[in-house]
Amino acid sequence: MKNEKILIDGLEYCNWNRELFEKAHAGGLNAIHVTLVYWEDTNESFEKINYWDNLIKSNSDILVHVKKSSDIIEAKQKNKIGIIYGFQNSAPIANDIFLVEKFFDKGLRFMQLTYNNQTPIAGGCYEKKDSGVSRFGEMVIEEMNRLGLIIDLSHAGKQTCLDAIEFSKKPVAISHANPNFFHKSIRNIDDDVLKKLSNKNGFIGLSLYPYHLKNHGDCKVEDFCEMVKRLINIMGEDSIGIGSDLCMNWPDEVVMWMRNGKWTKKIDYGESKDKNASWPKQPLWYSKPEDLPTLVDAMVSNGLNEKIAYKIGGINWLNFMSSHF
Amino acid sequence: MKNEKILIDGLEYCNWNRELFEKAHAGGLNAIHVTLVYWEDTNESFEKINYWDNLIKSNSDILVHVKKSSDIIEAKQKNKIGIIYGFQNSAPIANDIFLVEKFFDKGLRFMQLTYNNQTPIAGGCYEKKDSGVSRFGEMVIEEMNRLGLIIDLSHAGKQTCLDAIEFSKKPVAISHANPNFFHKSIRNIDDDVLKKLSNKNGFIGLSLYPYHLKNHGDCKVEDFCEMVKRLINIMGEDSIGIGSDLCMNWPDEVVMWMRNGKWTKKIDYGESKDKNASWPKQPLWYSKPEDLPTLVDAMVSNGLNEKIAYKIGGINWLNFMSSHF
């Protein structure tokens, strides 16, 4: 495959409109894994899929819905951005194993087992006690494996990560997080999990969300690149990508909704330790989708082999996805 | 209160019809906590409430919907059976704290945190690893306490029982289970949980479901009564009732649905160790709702003080309920 310069962002949550799509397109993005839901129930999630189907349809000159990984290559050839649907929670499938296939048939290609909190499937990273993967969780993982729906362990608890990596017959992903050796955070990942992930051919997409970065919004690109180089020693050069977790064009209510969903009447501030109810400030060098190619260049100027930098910029994601769909 | 001979079954799951109601009524039952749902989602559960509202309406000469505990006394005075609505799972509220009040407003008065499997709230008794009460679970318990919706720990894991007993500001119930000292079973309860339950003024309804009984369907009423006497030493005479778990008039598909719900494509046989897909055989002395008064008599003839036997037959349940609604 001649995909040397394919650019894929492995997770974004933006309030997309024509202008944002055009900028991402002009910036050279070839595919984006977009988040459709967090706390939404089954019906609301099917409605979100309808919403996205229409969004892609009305921007079909520059967008295409990715159902097979080969659609990404085709999108690039046709000068379009491939859009990959993902859920950042398993709330949409509730306790119904048959819904996994129904959502897959509608084009879902990534699903997180949990979003911070416990689900019927597994434990979230914010729980005092992480259940690991439950008996229903094992059924869901088998079903996701069968269909080729990628198991995303972002926002999962540590035991859940270890259980799911072990139990899944196909490699799993953590689509958007960083190593804890770079920045200690409830959402970032310990070395032992990374090693186990790597041993089972799993994947990590590196996050640009300020709370996952050393010095948050003041993180230097040099420090980020050093982290990448160190991570290659743990994960190898083929299992790392970018999952920027970029959240653009949303009012502050949305970050509070992401944290609180419908699960609490009290206010939960999530990753903000100073009870900040606003979106955190992005690093200047990564504040929009089209900053991905710039980051790839920065990796090269910070000493990373160009071939590896481009793998991380998208080729690795493409290869990982092609082992699923 | 002159309720010396009030008879309450603290849990039944029957396929009710006019004939069954008439028999229970003729047998002297004053109130029954009925199960509306197990695995049903939010919408299906609201529909089940509508179904039950209509069922009560069309049998209003002998039935009344219990919203306050005083409705039970009124039902007895009017020679009717009080029907108390309960969910044997928290699936109906999914991850939405606001649904607790919506269901309470429709007349729900009991809700289990789990049914065998993990939920967003807590761990089920069939899970390898019981999470205990989750962060959402704590919110739900606070909300149930506020409303006066009884927290039912039947089918919960041990850690979940301990956590919920500790965390709840109001006493909690295990509506249908037996002590493990009587019959060791995944659904029955260890002494340390019973002691903790008792210390916090909690309640247990004793089960007549064969898998919860010594020698299952061949259990002798004498053995059951001996268990009651021993349990009084742990729980005291005021915190024990009957929650017969009587399941009548259902085809075998329903017991398999109770076990498998929508959570697995494989067959799960639940409590049946020999893969029996049929309803287990009830003891002859407890096979219909109107066997409750006979059991009370049997407790007396087996050496229990009559006053205590009648407390266990219903007065205790009434007092426990009156501390909630």
Image (tube, coloured by chain):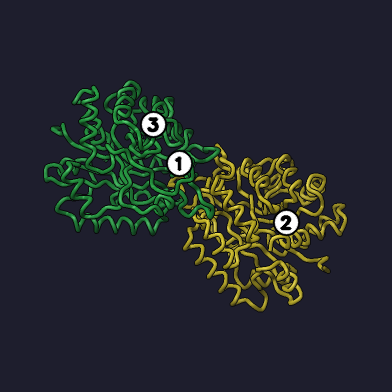
Chain colours: A yellow, B green
Q: Which amino acid does label 1 sit on?
A: Glu
Return the residue at label 1: B271
Q: What residue lies at 66% left-to-right and 73% top-to-bottom?
A: A64
**CA neighbours of label 1 inside 10 A, class few (<14), some (14 to 19), many (20+):** some
The Cα atoms of the two marked residues, 1 and 2, are separated by: 47 Å
Residue B109's place in the image compared with A59, above or below, is above
Q: What element carries label 3?
A: loop
Callout 3 crowding tier (Cα within 10 Å): few <14, some 14–19, many ≥20 = many
Amino acid marked by disc 2: Ile
Position above or below: B46 against A190: below
Viewer-nearest of discs 1 and 3: 3
Answer left or right for A65 relative to B205. right
Q: Residue B214 carries which label?
A: 3
User: Where's residue A163, x and y in %?
Assistant: 64, 43
Quadrant location of residue B323?
Answer: top left
Image x and y of residue B264, in percent:
52, 53
What is the quadrant of residue A298 in the picture? Answer: bottom right
To the question of a shared chain for discs 3 and 2, the answer is: no
Q: Front-most of B185 and A2? A: B185
Residue marked by disc 2:
A242
Q: What residue type is labelled 3?
A: Lys
